[in-house]
Image (spheres, grey):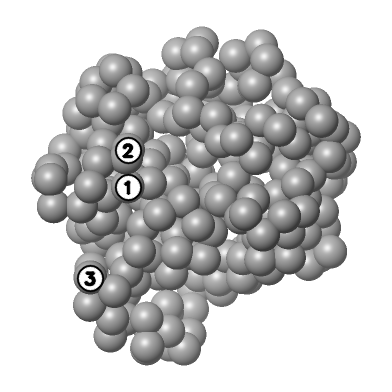
């Protein structure tokens, strides 16, 4: 559970850092601390749908001790419709593809439905023996297009290598590392987010630096930061997350209750 805790707290803290700045254009703000209000008018430490759906996935794995697609979907619907798995009893910032898929009862297999909605919640699968087919199936609860499914597989595989102690510098991302910030996009497109997260990790040397760099890319700040933060949590560990940020984080009891 230790590495899972590192990852999930790394993810949730980074999500909360990004919430106040979502949709803001790069260069129009500077995030240097965990603050509140802003884009969603939420108190400091409030995490978004990214962490909610990640915890809903964790809870299902904990309860079922396996991948149970219907149980995961049930938890997602409890979040969307009943405000469960939330930081403060309020569901906000729901992606269109995610909402449509949960309302319609099937994943959306469309090129234009390749937002971050499955990548942002797939990290728990790195900590169990989930096959690539199972990773794709969990993505497909909401995001069924092959681009999203493949991105989820790539992210889980990367996380597993980091969990095993491999150095991200040795994993063949030299071209991404060399890119200039202007060439890194932080939109809601799943491939942009995955690349941005890897770039942030490779161009920093601490958890704090990595997640702040992710937020300050602008636009989809919470998800870019969360995806970065999950990896940074694995690499640097819980103790390297600034204590004052953890102290501000909302509903830590729920986070701890969902860890397996």
Other-residue count near label 2 (Cα within 10 Å), few / some / many at <14 / 14–19 / ≥20: many
Q: Nearer the viewer, residue 259 or 106?
A: 106
What residue is pinned by disc 2?
22
Q: Is residue 108 left or right of residue 230?
A: right
- Mark sitting on residue 182: 3
Q: Residue at x 50, y 57 (%)?
A: 189
SS at mark 1 in the image = loop
Q: Nearer the viewer, residue 199 or 23?
A: 23
What residue is pinned by disc 1?
219
Q: Nearer the viewer, residue 98 or 260?
A: 98
Q: Earlier in the sequence, mark 2 or mark 1?
A: 2
Labels 2 & 1 near each other (Cβ < 8 A): yes
Would you place residue 38 above or below residue 137 in this image? above
Q: Residue at x 66, y 30 (%)?
A: 99
For marks 2 and 1, give the CA distance.
6 Å
Q: Is residue 189 left or right of residue 212?
A: right
Would you place residue 131 above or below residue 239 in this image? below
Other-residue count near label 1 (Cα within 10 Å), few / some / many at <14 / 14–19 / ≥20: many
SS at mark 2 in the image = loop
- Mark sitting on residue 205: none
Q: Position of residue 157 (x, y in %)?
A: 63, 70
Labels 3 & 2 near each other (Cβ < 8 A): no
């Amino acid at each position: 559970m230790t590495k899972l805790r590192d990852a999930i707290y790394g993810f949730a803290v980074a999500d909360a850092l990004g919430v106040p700045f979502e949709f803001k254009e790069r260069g129009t703000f500077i995030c240097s601390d965990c603050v509140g209000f802003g884009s969603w008018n939420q108190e400091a430490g409030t995490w978004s749908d990214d962490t909610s759906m990640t915890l809903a996935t964790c809870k299902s794995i904990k309860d079922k001790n396996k991948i149970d697609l219907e149980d995961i979907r049930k938890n997602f619907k409890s979040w969307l419709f009943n405000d469960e798995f939330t930081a403060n009893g309020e569901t906000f910032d729901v992606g269109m593809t995610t909402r449509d898929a949960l309302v319609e009862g099937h994943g959306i297999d469309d090129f234009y439905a390749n937002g971050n909605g499955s990548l942002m919640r797939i990290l728990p699968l790195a900590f169990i023996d989930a096959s690539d087919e199972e990773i794709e199936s969990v993505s497909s609860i909401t995001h069924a297009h092959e681009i999203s499914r493949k991105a989820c597989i790539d992210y889980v595989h990367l996380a597993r290598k980091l969990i095993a102690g491999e150095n991200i510098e040795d994993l063949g991302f030299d071209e991404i590392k060399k890119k200039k910030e202007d060439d890194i996009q932080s939109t809601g497109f799943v491939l942009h987010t995955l690349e941005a997260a890897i770039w942030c990790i490779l161009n920093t040397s601490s958890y704090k630096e990595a997640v702040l760099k992710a937020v300050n890319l602008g636009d989809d700040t919470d998800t870019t930061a969360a995806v970065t933060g999950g990896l940074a949590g694995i690499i640097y560990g819980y103790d390297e997350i600034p204590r004052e940020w953890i102290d501000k984080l909302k509903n830590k009891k729920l986070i701890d209750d969902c860890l397996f």
